[in-house]
Image (cartoon, rainbow, N blue to C red):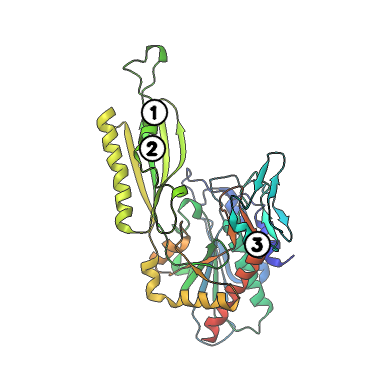
Amino acid sequence: MSKVVERFLKYVKFDTKSDEEKECCPSTEGQRVLGKELILELEKLGLQEVMMDSNGYVMATLPANTAKSIPVIGFIAHMDTSPDMSGANVKPQVIENYQGGDIVLNSAENIVLSPKAYPELSNYIGKTLITTDGTTLLGADDKAGIAEILTAVEYLIEHSEIPHGTIKVAFTPDEEIGRGADLFDVAKFNADFAYTVDGGSLGELECENFNAAGAKVIINGINVHPGSAKNKMVNSMLIASEFISLLPRDETPSNTEGYEGFFHLTSINGEVEKTTLNYIIRDFFMDSYEKRKALLKELEAKLNGKYGENTVRVEIKDQYKNMKEKIQPVMHIVDTAEKAMMLSEVTPKVVPIRGGTDGARLSFMGLPTPNLFTGGENFHGKFEYISTYSMEKAVEVILNIIKLYSEN
C-alpha cells in the first residue's frame, strides 16, 4: 500500500465534521485533534516553523535546498468534513481491481454504489477504489488533499537531490462551512502563491468558483390549541413551505450544471411557533448573484405583507467571491499546473468550481490560490469514493509543479 493511501486511511478515522451553528474556531474539537496529529507528523518529517495557532490552523515550512531564486509555493488543504453527513466511525472499504458493475456498500441496509447512478465509476475499471460502508461520508474532501500534500513533501525530503524553493504547507479548519480562510494569517504563511488541493476527479484544475452566500430564513408563527385555532393559529411551517415554493423550482443543485447558479435548501427545523430554513446561494456572475440575494429579500417583504410584519426574517451573509479576477493577472500558476499534469500523464480539465474552496477567499486576501484535484468523487455523502491511482497522481502533480518552478 502506498504512503499516500496509508495516510488517507489513517486521517479518515478522525471525526472532523464542522458545525455551522457554532461560532468558535475550529467549530468542532475533532478538527483540533487531527491538527495535533498532523503537527506530530510534520515535526517527525523534519519540517520547520511547525505550529498550530489558537484557532486550529496548522502551518509548516520546508526550507529551500538551493540558492536559486525560486518562488515560495504554498499547498493548502482543509481538515474538516461536511456537516451534510456523519464523519464519525468512518469504515473505509478497499475495492481492489474494480471490474465494473455495482459495489455493495452495506448489504444490511441495501446500499449500493452503482454505475447506473454514477457513470463516472466506469473511468476506474482496473483501479483500486476506497469507498464508504454506506453509513457515513468518506472524508476525501479534504483528507485526501492532506495526505497528498504530506506525501509529496516527504518525497522531497527523502530525495534531497531534487532542487526546490521554500515550500509552505497549511491545513485549515471549517472550510466546509465557509469560514476556512477567516483567520488564515497570509502574512505569516508568506508564500508568493499557493494551491489548494481540494478538487474532485482526476485532472480537475480550477481557477474560478461560485460567488457564495449563506441565508437563514426565520419564520415566526402563533400556536394555539388546534380545536380553537380558527383565525388565530399561524403555522410557521406552512409559511415556510410557501416561501420554498416561491423560489425558482429549476434553480437547485440537482437541476443545474456548468456556470448555472442555484438556491440550495440545506436544512429545515420547524414547529408551529417557529421554523428556520438554511440556504446557500451560488452564482458565478456578480450581477445574477446580487439578484438572487435580492429575491430572498423580496419574498421576505411579500410574505410579511401577507401575514404581518416580522413574520419572516431573512438574514444573508456573504461567504466568498469568484477568484477569477485575482488569478488572471498571475495565470502562470495555472499554466504551470497544466504542464505538471501533462508531465504526469494526466489530462488537465480546467473547469469552474461548482462550490467553494479556501483558495477563493485567500486569493482576495493577497494569496492567489487555484485548486488542484484530489481524485475524490461524490463528496459529502455515503456514495463518496476515491481511486488510489488518482491520489498517487495528485502527489506526482504537486511534485511536478515544484520541479517546474525550480527549473525555470
Q: Which residue is mark 3?
A: 124
Amino acid on which disc 2 is placed:
Ile
Q: Looking at the image, is mark 1 or mark 3 earlier in the sequence? A: 3
Question: From mark 2 to mark 1, how far is it between C-alphas?
Answer: 10 Å
Residue 190 percent across, percent down from the top left: 47, 72
> Is residue 42 among what the camera can see?
no
Q: Nearer the viewer, mark 2 or mark 3?
A: 3
**Label 1 crowd (10 A; few <14 / some 14-19 / many >=20):** some
Q: Determine whether the residue tagged by mark 3 lies in a helix, strand or loop.
A: helix
Q: Earlier in the sequence, mark 2 or mark 3?
A: 3
Asked if labels 3 and 1 touch by Cβ distance under 8 angstroms, the answer is no
- Callout 1: SS: helix
Q: Residue 238, labelled with which disc?
A: 1
Tag 2 residue = 244
Q: Quadrant of residue 60?
A: bottom right
Number of residues whose C-alpha sits closer than 10 Å to that of mark 3, classed few (under 14), some (14–19) or many (20 or more): some
